[in-house]
Structure formats: C-alpha cells, structure tokens
Image (tube, grey):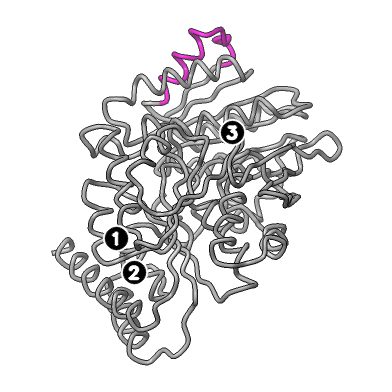
Amino acid sequence: MKSFFRSLVVSILTAEARLLLRRHKPTIVAITGSVGKTSTKDAIYVAIKDSVRARKSQKSFNSEIGVPLTILGLPTGWDNPLRWVWNVVDGAFTVLFTRTYPNVLVLETGVDTPGDMEQLVSWLKPDVVVLTRLPDVPVHVEQFSSPTAVIEEKMKLVHGMHAEGTLIYNHDDEIIKNQLPEVRQKSLGYGRYLPTEFKVEKDTLQYKDDVPSGLSFSVVHGDEKSDITLAGVVGTQHALGCAAALAVAQVLGIKTTDAAKGLQTLSAPPGRLRIIAGIKGSVLIDDTYNSSPIALEHALETLSEIKYAKRRIAVLGDMLELGKYSSDEHRRLGKRVGETCDVLLTLGVRARGFAEGALSNGLNDKTVFQYENVARAGRELQAMLQPGDVVLVKASQSIRAERVIQEVMAEPERAEQLLARQDRDWRATI
C-alpha cells in the first residue's frame, strides 16, 4: 500500500510538473554526475540569480520525486501522507493559477537504479546539461550490472537535451571525454589540469593565524580572468563548480563579471568540505554529506595539502552501494590514508577495510581505532584531540557522521546552521 501511494503521488506530481513546464517554458539547466552535483548546482544558482529569475533544487532533490517538487516549488512530505496529499493539491493550484514563474530552472538530477534517468528525460528536455564527474567506481553501482551501465544511464540526460542545447563538462575527466563523440550538441569544457574553455588556475588555500580559512582561485576564459575567493571551504571541486557556473552564465547570455560577482557570495552546502572550528584549537573538515571512492580520494588529497597541521586525523565511515567493488575500494583508499594521515578512526563494518589498507601501508596500529557506534567514536575523539589537529570526517549518508562533528565542534549550538541533516525529520531517524 505504501509503495502504491508513493507511485501514485510521483505520477501526479510529475504530470503537474510537465503541465507547468508547458505553460511557462523556462530554460532548464540540469546537472548530473557522480560527485559534486549539489555544490555545482548552488554555484550556478548564485552566479545567475541576480541577472535572471531563477530557481534551484532544494538541497539534494535529484530523484524521480525531487525534480517535480523543485519544478512545482514544493517541499518534501517525508513520511507524512497528509503532507503529500497537500503537495498534490498545492501543485494543482500552482499549475492552474500561477502567473509568474522562474525564467531558469537549475535542477540536480541523479540515478539510483537502472531506468531512473530514462524515465526523467521522457518528459524533461534540458537546454543545458552540466556533467561533473564519471568515476571508475560510481556510487549506486551495486544496483547496476557494471560501472559502464551507470555511465550510460547518466549520459541519457545528455542525449535527452534539446537539439540546440549545450553540454558543459569536466574536461579533466577522461571517461567523460570518451563519451563526447556521441554528443551532437555544442559542448564547453571546464577544468583544472588541461587547457579548456573555462580553466581554473592558481587555486590556493587561504589561512588566518595558521588555520585554513577558505579557497582562492582564478577562472580563465579567453581574455577574461575572474578572481574568486570562497570563505570557509577547502577543495578544488568548489573551484570546478564555479568554473562550470561561469560557463552556464555565458550560455545564458550573462556577463562573466556579473556571474563572478555573484560567486563571491557562494556558501557551500553543509557537509561538503566545509571548515568548522573544533574543540581544543582543532580544525574540522566537514565532508559528511556522503561518500564515494572518487569523493574520498579528493578529500584525502585536500587534507594532505593543508599546512600547519599538527596531526592529520581521518574519521571515515562506510562507503555504501558499491556492491562487489566495496572491499577493494575500502582497502585501496585505506592505503591512501596510510600515506596522508597520522590517525584513523573508522565507522562501520565496511570501513574496517580502511584500517586494513592503512595498516598495510605503514600507519601505526596504535593510531588506528575502529568503531561500530558513531556516538562513541565522537566521544573518544574528544579525548584524543590536541591543539593544531586537522580532522577530516566523511562517510555515506546513513552512517550519519555529522554526529561526530557535533561532538567535537567548538560551537555545538550552531549545529543546526552548519551541519548536514539537521531537519526535524532527519533527526528523528537517528
């Protein structure tokens, strides 16, 4: 019955969203990939919102129900049937009576199972598609026959674009570039390491009193150079998201100077490599929103680049939905931990592979701690911390590793403002 009700609600909301798009005909910018979708979506929105009337996906609303909700401007109903009934009624009212509507929709799209993207593009035809990364072992791969099948599913969004649409893609990603010969539409690249249309240069961590405070970089496009500083974050992926945003702005006819000015106000979503002050003079790198092999690899690289760290501590939880690749990927990333970190705490059964890999690559067994209980890990981390420690915390969503951050952040009273999954409905699932 619950499954039938959900299917019915999805069908009705999708029909309402289709009618609303037919009425108002907004320009649709759709983002997909296996990492960095939400950060890129937020960057695009702040780059264009002062020049055009725009709406973006709420948080990470990228599913078969999240996309229609964004189009209709409705919140999630969580597990409350009455909320969903009200959403259906409110959606019908919006379709029939709304007079004003955004000129541009910035939509995050994702896939969990085979057919997800195919179903979406059966009714959603983007004008611009932004493709972030297509890694060798993507998240959700356990639901597919192979990593290639995940790539093919995500590429259906690109192939579903309008004939006059534009693909904006990560030019550093070889897997994406291998897909380009099949793309008929115009394409624009962005990246950090190879020459391309929108290139990130001089990305540098900023420090205040020997503590990381943000990221500065330039995005070069032809003869134009945009200098951007983002406060409170680390990680090159934030710079890449801004480069993609400037490319989208150009496609929409927005001046690069105006888009770059908007990007100066960008605040990264909670749980995406955000800098948070920790207790005892420590620094926390909060990357707790989710985890996958490529995202963790980037996070560990970022941790290794932070200067003035007395110790580099990694608190890593299970990477879920990797299927048969899970054991090998946990051990492989564990070896990377052994190269970059001084202390490792693991959360969950699969994360024991991190410990195995780290120990096999030289990390002292006296500095490796394994936990099943996240709350206990947070409490014991409190006792371990010393002034000058830099702590990376990262895990898949259901591990709820943000609870570790809350245990050791200097201002726990700001948890609702700073951390992921602080809605009442999320907290009720603990």
| Category of crowding for the residue at label 1, using alpha-carbon neighbours closer than 10 angstroms: few (below 14), some (14–19), many (at least 20) | many
| Category of crowding for the residue at label 2, using alpha-carbon neighbours closer than 10 angstroms: few (below 14), some (14–19), many (at least 20) | many
Q: Looking at the image, is mark 2 or mark 3 earlier in the sequence?
A: 2
- Extent of the magenta region: 351-367
Task: Please name the amino acid that badge 1 sits on.
Answer: Glu
Residue 250 x/y as whole percent: 59, 61
Task: Please name the amino acid that badge 3 sits on.
Answer: Leu
- Return the residue at label 2: 68
Q: Secondary structure at mark 1?
A: loop
**Mark 2 or 3, closer to the camera:** 3
25 or 272, nearer to the observer: 25
Proximity of marks 1 and 2: CB atoms separated by less than 8 Å: yes
- Return the residue at label 3: 194
Predominant SS along the magenta part: helix
Which residue is located at x 72 percent, y 57 percent?
264
Which residue is located at x 26 percent, y 35 percent?
142
**Name of the residue lying farthest toward the right:** 209
Q: Secondary structure at mark 3?
A: loop
Residue 216 x/y as whole percent: 74, 44
Which mark is drawn over residue 414? Answer: none
Task: Please name the amino acid that badge 2 sits on.
Answer: Pro
Assess whether residue 352 is covered by the magenta stretch: yes
**Mark 3 or 1, closer to the camera:** 3
- Return the residue at label 1: 64
For the residues labelled 2 and 3, the Cα–Cα distance comes to: 37 Å
Q: Looking at the image, is mark 3 or mark 1 earlier in the sequence?
A: 1
Q: Quadrant of residue 249?
A: bottom right
Which residue is located at x 61 percent, y 47 percent?
198
| Category of crowding for the residue at label 3, using alpha-carbon neighbours closer than 10 angstroms: few (below 14), some (14–19), many (at least 20) | few
216 or 152, nearer to the observer: 152
